[in-house]
Image (cartoon, rainbow, N blue to C red):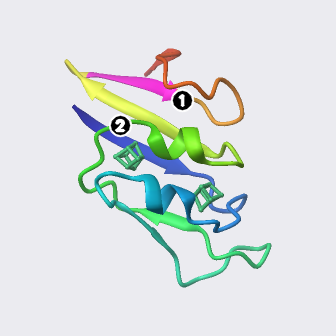
Amino acid sequence: MAGKIVINSERCKGCGLCVVVCPRKTIVISGISNKNGYFPAQTDNGDCTGCAACAVVCPEAIIEVLREGSGRVIVAIEPGKEKKPTLTKEKA
Ligand code: SF4
Ligand code: SF4
């Protein structure tokens, strides 16, 4: 299963929990601070599976998780809303 995440870096507080929990080690902490002075998480989505562990652990609920399959992209977690790793809607 291929996956992808989108991090709202301007709201990230750089706690690093997502970095620690990611089983594929695809998230790192940026060396460039955001407007609030935090060094945010960033990713190239290299080996992301869409497992959603990062989004579930994020205390700020700012990670969107997308899963790809059969030519479709599914939003698994929508930031600030349902935090359980359940499929919520299909993305165009
Ligand atoms: S969805 Fe899973 S594999 Fe992808 S970045 Fe988050 S924790 Fe890592
Ligand atoms: S868990 Fe959330 S707040 Fe913490 S570094 Fe990751 S994205 Fe930022």
Residue 74: % across, % down? 40, 22
Q: Is mark 1 within 8 Å of ligand 1?
A: no
Q: Going by the picture, which residue comes out furthest to the bottom?
A: 31
Give the answer, above or below, for where 74 lies relative to 14: above
Per the image, the residue denoted by label 1 is 77
To which quarter of the image does residue 15 belong?
Answer: bottom right
Residue 10: % across, % down? 70, 62
Give the answer, above or below, for where 38 lies relative to 26: below
Judge from the rendering whether residue 80 lies leftward or rightward of residue 78; answer left or right: right
Residue 34: % across, % down? 69, 74
Q: Secondary structure at mark 2?
A: loop
Per the image, the residue denoted by label 2 is 50
Q: Earlier in the sequence, mark 2 or mark 1?
A: 2
Question: At 44% across and 53% down in the image, what residue appears?
Answer: 21
Look at the image and give the residue range highlighted in magenta.
72-76
Question: At 59% across and 83% down in the image, what residue appears?
Answer: 32
Q: Amino acid at mark 2?
A: Gly
Q: Is residue 73 magenta?
A: yes
Q: Is mark 2 within 8 Å of ligand 1?
A: yes
**Secondary structure mostly seen in the magenta stretch:** strand
Q: Amino acid at mark 1?
A: Ile
